Image (spheres, grey):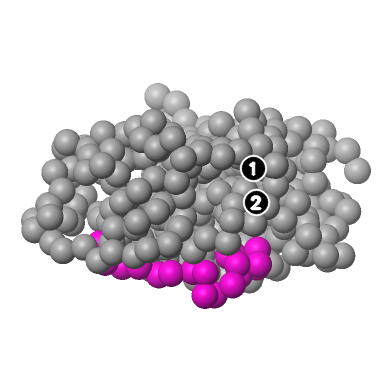
Amino acid sequence: MRIDFNRLECGSAFAISSETTRTDGGAELVSVPDVLFLPNALDQGQSICVAQQRTVPVEAILDCWNLGFLQRGRDQLPQPRYADDFEADRREGPACILGSVFTRNFGHWTEELLKVAALEQANIGCTYVIPTLPAFARASLSFLGVEDERVAVVDSPTVFARALFVDAVSHQNIAQHPQRLGLLRELVAERLGDAGGEGRKRLWLERREMVGNAGRLANPEEVHALVDSYGFELVDMATLSFPDQLRTISQASVIAGVHGSQFVHAQFMPKHSTVIECFSPAYVNPSVLEICRALGHSYHQVVARCNLVVPYTLGRDCQVDCEHLSLILESLQD
């Protein structure tokens, strides 16, 4: 067996199989036979699924652009694996594959948890398949009540006799599917028990641990002094366990910081909270807009100044415009 990545096409699993069902929570499920899982196709944790030898289900990658990234990125990125002959294992039983091109990133991993919430609400009892991923993957599944024996770490090509796919809901379209976000929030609230909060804290989200793509705070002393004067606590989510991250964010009414995966925690804040995201002008890529829309959050964006006379020289690292930030903080209600 070998894979010609240029011949792969993105399509819907629902167009491949008629074995579909709708859960009480409104999620659409489909069972597809003989799905090939190619773990670590590009790099560790960057995986892909193939059905009928050439179709990559959009439900597995959430956005067809992700397939194009793997196909077009070869000039800048490593050659994808599996272009040469390989053998694949085979596994029986229903499985939901939680592995795509970007799931090693915490923010995109939480999109996979939207699938988990739908399947757990429906009591499907399937096995969840992942490649080797950072520790947050297993920790979050455990927190959501998935037993260890229902998690299979697969790092070699494998054909699954029955693969379950959930209709494609991501952070890009979550406002159109608020019930799916509601399922995940309900599951989190149930697992936290009485440990949730009333949403009164103000948090500045630090980026110190596990920063892999730059995007650090370039003027920390100035920013920390400013947010401290407005009652913010500094917290680096990467230093907390997954349950503690959720307990912390459930107590926040305002989060602010430099853009990064930590902002997907906005989906676990109380409704009608405030999100303040700071960017370098070299990298403005807000990913929580639809989360904010779905939950009624107030969203503010602070972009460092940049013009033809004084160009920005810090790349993706962020020099926060404290004058702009202070204007937003002044408008916050107690």
- Which residue lies at the image location 60% right of the left edge and 35% below the top edge? 174
Task: Please say whether residue 260 is visible from this viewpoint.
Answer: no
- Which residue lies at the image location 18% right of the left edge and 56% below the top edge? 81
Total marks in image: 2
Q: Are marks 2 and 1 in contact (CB under 8 Å)?
A: yes
Badge number at residue 122: 2
| Residue found at the very far bottom of the displayed protein | 149
* Mark 2 / mark 1, whichever is N-terminal: 1
> Does residue 225 lie above or below 244 as drawn?
above
Q: In the rendering, at what x and y percent does residue 75 appear?
A: 15, 43
Depth check, front residue: 25 or 114: 25
Secondary structure under badge 1?
Answer: loop
Secondary structure under badge 2?
Answer: loop
Type of amino acid under label 1:
Thr
Q: Quadrant of the C terminus?
A: top right
Badge number at residue 23: 1
Task: Please say whether residue 152 is visible from this viewpoint.
Answer: yes
> Does residue 31 lie above or below 311 as drawn?
below
Toward which corner of the image does residue 235 lie, by quadrant? Answer: bottom right
Type of amino acid under label 2:
Ala
Q: Does the stretch in magenta take in 310? A: no
Q: Is residue 120 left or right of residue 88?
A: right
> Does residue 18 lie above or below 263 as drawn?
above
Q: Kindly report the distance in space between the C-alpha atoms of the residues bearing marks 2 and 1.
A: 6 Å
Q: In the rendering, at what x and y percent does residue 267 appear?
A: 67, 46
Depth check, front residue: 229 or 255: 255
Depth check, front residue: 322 or 92: 92
Question: Which segment is the magenta one?
Answer: 140-157
Q: In the rendering, at what x and y percent does residue 56 appear?
A: 31, 40
- Which residue lies at the image location 85% right of the left edge and 58% below the top edge? 197
- Which residue lies at the image location 48% right of the left edge and 62% below the top edge? 128
